[in-house]
Image (tube, helix red, strand yellow):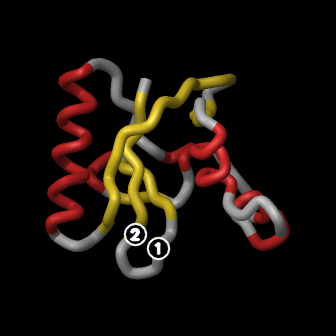
Amino acid sequence: MKVITANRLLNGDVVWLAEGGAWVERITLASTFDGKDAVAEGLAEGAEAEKNQQVVGVYEMDVTVEDGVIVPVRLREKIRAKGPTTHPQFGKQAQAVSA
């Protein structure tokens, strides 16, 4: 299972592709893609957003779903989803997270 991620071009925030082509700041709101064709479609949508200068650095990332919540597989992606590792009071983990 995959999600499509990038950075918002205006402010550098980590974002994920959601329904309707929206880019969201919470991985829990991202759309998931299963299978080669679905991932290719998601990447194409991301490439179009990159072309329109909404985001930069679009790529797919592996995730699992645990208790209905999307969870990144790799440590790098876990850090990107949670925010800075040195000051948690300033990162995404300091904000309320809803599924």
Q: Amino acid at mark 2?
A: Arg
Mark 2, secondary structure of its residue: strand
Q: Residue 66 at x, y = what percent?
A: 66, 24
Whole-percent x, y for residue 17 in the image: 37, 50
User: Residue 14: x, y in percent?
Assistant: 50, 61
Q: Position of residue 29 (x, y in %)?
A: 50, 47
What is the spatial separation of the Cα atoms under label 2 and label 1, in whole angstroms?
A: 5 Å
Q: Is residue 86 left or right of residue 45?
A: right
Say whether marks 2 and 1 touch (CB < 8 Å): yes
In the drawing, does residue 24 fall left or right of residue 94?
A: left
Alpha-carbon neighbours of circle 2 within 10 Å: few (<14), some, or many (≥20)? many
Residue 43 vertical placement versus 85 (above, below) = above
Location of the C terminus by quadrant is top right
Identify which amino acid the numbered label 1 is placed on: Gly
The quarter of the picture where residue 41 lies is: top left
Q: Which residue is mark 2?
A: 8
> Which residue lies at the image location 24% right of the left edge and 43% below the top edge?
43
Crowd around label 1: few <14 · some 14–19 · many ≥20 (10 Å): few
Q: Secondary structure at mark 1?
A: loop
Left or right: where does residue 71 sit relative to residue 47? Answer: right
Q: Quadrant of residue 61?
A: top left
At horizontal 15% and vertical 57% (from top left) the residue drawn is 48
Residue at 34 percent of width and 46 percent of height: 59
Q: Quadrant of residue 35?
A: top left
What residue is disc 1 on? 12
Q: How many marks?
A: 2
